[in-house]
Amino acid sequence: EIEDVEEEEEEDEECPHTPAARVEMYKELAEEKAEKEAREKERQPKDRDFDKEQAERIEEVRRAEEDGKIRQCNEGKWTFSFDEYAKPGHVVLDVACQRHLDS
C-alpha cells in the first residue's frame, strides 16, 4: 500500500495540470505569439511615399535629358524603319514585332 501511495504522489508531481504548470504554459504561448507577430511585422511591406519616389525619379530623368543622354533604346532589338516621305507632314514608324507580344 505504501508503494502505491508513493507512485501516485510521483505521478501527481509530474502532472501538468497544476496552476503553476498552466501559468508557465500560458507564458510560453504568449512568448511564441509575440515572436510570431514580430516576424509577421518584419515581413510586412514598408510604408513608402510614392509621390516622393516619383518626384525623385522625374528629377533624375530630367537631369539625364538635359545632359543629352539617350532616354530610350531598342532593348528588344526590334527591326524598324522610318518613312518621312509617305505623306507630307507625316512620319511613319514601322516596327516588326512578335506575334504574341506582352505589352
Image (tube, grey):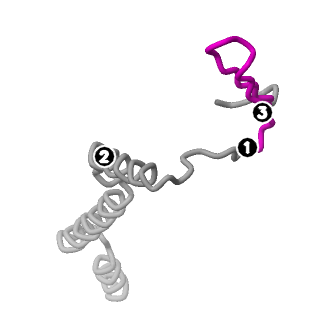
Quadrant location, the N terminus? bottom left
* Residue assigned mark 2: 55
Quick one: quadrant of the C terminus? top right
Q: Which residue is mark 3?
A: 80
Disc 1, disc 2: CB below 8 Å? no
Give me the C-alpha separation between circle 2 and circle 3: 33 Å
Question: How crowded is the residue under tag 1: few (<14 C-alpha within 10 Å), some, or many (20+)?
Answer: few
| Residue farthest to the top, as pictured | 87
Q: Which residues are magenta?
A: 77-97
| Residue 32 figure quarter | bottom left
Which amino acid, mark 1?
A: Gly
* 67 with respect to 8 (left or right): right
| Residue name at image x 64 percent, y 16 percent | 90
The residues tagged by marks 3 and 1 sit, at their Cα atoms, a distance apart of 11 Å
Classify mark 2: helix, strand or loop.
helix
Q: Nearer the viewer, mark 2 or mark 3?
A: 3
Q: Residue at x 36, y 88 (%)?
A: 3
Mark closer to the chain start, 2 or 3: 2
The residue to which callout 1 is attached is 76
| Residue 60 drawn at (x, y percent) | 39, 54
Magenta segment includes 60: no
Q: Nearer the viewer, residue 37 or 52?
A: 52
Please give the name of the residue rendered at 31% of the width and 58% of the height, measured from the top-left corner. Answer: 41
| Res 44 label | none
